[in-house]
Image (spheres, grey):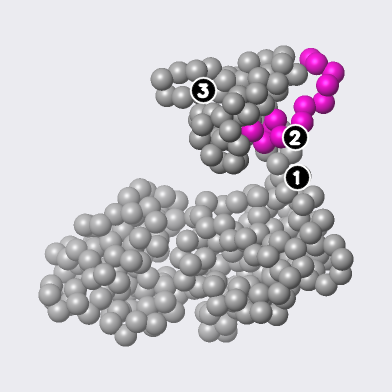
Amino acid sequence: MNKSEPSWDFYRTFLAVLREGSLSAAARELGLTQPTIGRHIDALETMIGFQLFIRSPQGLMPTEAAIDLKPHAEQLAANAAALLKAATGQGGGVRGTVRISASEVIGIEVLPPMLTALADRHPDLVIELSLSDAVEDLLRQEADIAVRMVAPEQDALITRRIGGIPLGLYAHRRYLDTHGTPETLEDLSQHRTIGFDRESAFVRSVRKRVPLIDLMRPSFRADSNLAQLAAIRAGFGIGVCQVALAKRDPDLMRLFETEFELPLETFVVMHENLKTTPRCRVAYDALVEGLLAYIGR
């Protein structure tokens, strides 16, 4: 192996090519030119002594060496991000960047007022919001704080259980005026319903707790909770919605309230190493306070 130390820029380029699958797409991602991306990859291959990518009709395919190198490069990226956040947070007071991970519905429908109040109190705070239903790894510093719907199993995490966000079965008044209101659970099979397009662990757990889900034959399927919520609001059919969100719209009508009662367990999580970092501490406390108020505690 070449004794020269590869530049961090080479590893960043390597990760971008892995993610994007081509030099041109990586160049757009990083704001560099395609020849520069090519030079970075060539230089990194020379320094480590291995070929990293093979050209194919589908784009650049990673070699076994590239796959082995990926987690180490990701760790370098996490460390670089942590260093930058630590540097921007110096100088006293609450300042710098805090990255928050949350699901689409929580991040778009629930958190904005809380984050606005947080920013008003701490104008030097920069908030990054990562929206995904996937669980980001706090130990690898993919996020500083996460709002999760599953209890964390990792050690070295500070966890505050918020409680169950109530879910209900809803339809827009416009849909019910056109198609009628189901009077019995069996009537659900005659209605347009909204559900997931795949059988996830969450869907299986819901089916065990709420058997009436089996009576629903979705006419609209999506892997996005936000898309399902939009379909309910548009009057497409009957679907599951957070009770607190539904209360914002008087035209959303709850169905089978006693038969369908499902709490969505919610947690706010942070790496324990960040508990004394002012920007993370105030953000963590603001999310806990705001989410507790959201579910009515």
The residue at 47%/71% (across/down) is 109
Where 153 sits versus 57, above or below?
A: below
Quadrant in the rendering for residue 97: bottom right
Residue 128: % across, % down: 62, 60
- Does 194 sit above or below residue 197? below
> Pointer 1: what residue?
80
Q: Could you tell me residue 122's position as x and y percent?
A: 72, 76
Circle 3 SS class: strand
Residues shaded magenta: 1-13
Q: Nearer the viewer, residue 255 or 122?
A: 122
Which residue bears the numbered disc 2? 8
Q: Amino acid at mark 2?
A: Trp
Please state if 105 lies on the left or on the right of 18 as rendered: left
Q: Of the numbered discs in the image, which one, if any, rests on residue 115?
A: none
Between 102 and 123, the residue placed more toward the observer is 123
Task: Assess whether mark 2 and mark 1 are in contact (beta carbons under 8 angstroms).
Answer: yes
